[in-house]
Amino acid sequence: MLVELDKLQKSATSLTASLQATLHNSASQIQSQIPQIQQSYTDLSAALSSTANELRSIIVNQELPLQEKVSRVGKEVRERIQPLLESVKKGVSEVLARSEPASTVNGNGHGGH
C-alpha cells in the first residue's frame, strides 16, 4: 500500500509540474500575441471609423437622390465592410488556431483523447 501511495504522490507531483508548465507556456503565448492583437484592434477601429464617417456622409447628403444613396452605401459595404469582416474572421481564426493545440494537448493531459 505504501508503494501505491508513493506512486500516487509522484504522479500527483508530476501532474502539478506539468500543469504549471502548461499554464506558464499558455500565459507566455498569450503575452506574445497581445501587441499583435492591439495593433489589429487599432487598425480595425480606424477602418470602421473611416467607413462609418463615409456612410454617414452619403446618407446625410441632401443633394443625392435616394437611389444614388442606396447604390453608394451598397458599394461601400462591398468594398470596405466585407473585407473588414473577412479580415476579422481571419484574425480570429489564426488566434484560435494558435491556441487550440495547447488546449487540445493539455486539456486532459493525454493529447486530446
Image (cartoon, rainbow, N blue to C red):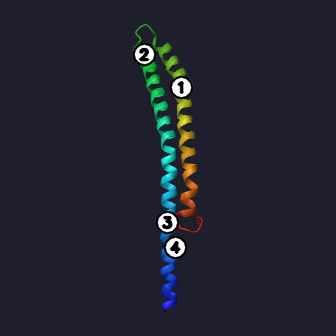
- Nearest to N terminus: mark 3 or mark 4: 4
The picture places residue 6, in percent across and down from the top left corner, at 49, 85
- Nearest to N terminus: mark 2 or mark 4: 4
- What residue sits right under mark 3 in the picture? 19
Task: Give the residue furthest to the bottom.
Answer: 1
**Spatial separation of the CA atoms under disc 2 and disc 3:** 54 Å
The picture places residue 102, in percent across and down from the top left corner, at 56, 57
Q: Residue at x 41, y 19 (%)?
A: 56
33 up-or-down from 59: above or below: below
Identified by mark 1, the residue type is Arg
Other residues around mark 4 within 10 Å, as few (<14) / some (14–19) / many (≥20): few
18 up-or-down from 33: above or below: below
18 up-or-down from 10: above or below: above
62 up-or-down from 78: above or below: above
Tell me the SS state at disc 2: helix
Task: Give the residue furthest to the top.
Answer: 63
- What residue sits right under mark 1 in the picture? 80
